[in-house]
Image (cartoon, helix red, strand yellow):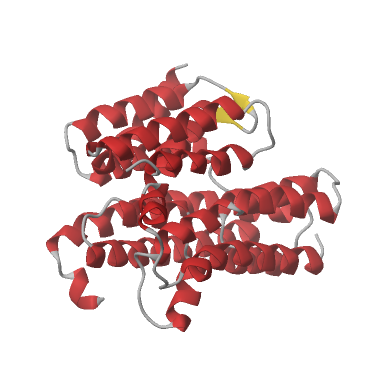
Amino acid sequence: MIEALRDPRMRSVVTASLTLSLAVGVFGASFGVGAVTAGASVAQACVISLLVFTGASQFSAVSVVGAGGSTASALGGALLLAARNGVYGLAMARRLDGSIGKKLIAAQLTIDESTAMAAAQTDPVAQRTAFWVTGCSIYVFWNLGTLLGAIVGTALDPKTFGLDAAFPAAYVAMVWPLLGQRRSLLAAALGAAICISLIPFVPVGIPILCAALAVLVGVPR
Amino acid sequence: MTWTLVFALAAGAYFFKVLGLVLIGDRSLPQVLERCLGLIPAALIAALVFKDTFSIGQHLQIDARVAGVGAAVVVAWRRAPLILVIVIGAGVTAAVRALS
């Protein structure tokens, strides 16, 4: 792992991970503020970020609770958003190695950013390193941000700095190298089309899951 | 906010995260499944780009993000380093937002 970090190709992964992590930290702070505003204690806000660690689900749960929704509806909406991490796990299973213990830790770090950063690398060693570097640095910043936001009670608005666009921008660069292969390009186009056409009609979380159906372009030889 | 919700959320989220890793594990699969699994990142990351650029919740919306991500596409195409793509995506979005 440390050895792999010396690889010059990893320098761009590390700098990009830290940049994304800063953006994640600002969102973490706004989660901390939102959670406390919705009636969570500082401890609850921090435990959510430590254990749940999947931003969209956390924001969704807190907004349902804040609006006076039931535990069941908060849970339902949040888990629908968390389900896509299961699909990432299917993809990462082939790329991760090591003991079952190591995989159980890797599972906690299996989110949009770590999966995308891994997928953008060309060889298995680089993919694994990118996954761990991104997952760990985002984990640290997300949780520090949450703690800070929950304690201080105010946070910067991520939108002022365009940070909401930092993620799709990063994903553009991460998916780019995959588009060279015709079949991946087809899967990407179809996945995007499925997702965007379903967004107005189904609950949040489902469009992305349905986008996974685009992998069926892999069926023909 | 109840602790029940906190821990139910944690258990549910981890269940999904671990499901994929455990379900597949190291076992060997038919070629066709391997091909499909290999396409997951392309399909989902592309979908994320469109979702994060053109929607808020269940609403499709064109706003400053489109300019930022558009700029990111241009610099990614020019093979700029990842960090630059991220900074330009956020920076252009922030600038357009401030001006509009």
Residue A123: where, in percent of width, then height? 21, 60
For residue A64, above or below residue A131: above
In the image as oriented, which residue stretches furthest toward the top?
A: B100
A58 vs A97, left or right, is right
In this view, the residue in front, B8 or A49, is B8
Q: Residue at x 43, y 60 (%)?
A: A138
In the image as oriented, which residue stretches furthest toward the left?
A: A8
A104 vs A119, left or right, is right
For residue A65, above or below residue A150: above
Q: Examine the rendering and report whether any part of residue A161 can be seen.
A: no
Q: Quadrant of residue A179?
A: top left
Q: Quadrant of residue A178?
A: top left
Residue A144: where, in percent of width, then height? 51, 64
For residue A110, above or below residue A24: below
Residue A49: where, in percent of width, then height? 60, 63
Figure quadrant of the N terminus of chain A:
bottom left
Residue A214: where, in percent of width, then height? 46, 38
In this view, the residue in front, A26 or A165, is A165
User: How many marks overall?
Assistant: 0
Q: Residue at x 17, y 32 (%)?
A: B78
Q: Residue at x 64, y 59 (%)?
A: A150
Q: Residue at x 39, y 37 (%)?
A: A187
Q: Examine the rendering and report whether any part of residue B76 can be seen.
A: yes
Figure quadrant of the C terminus of chain A:
top left
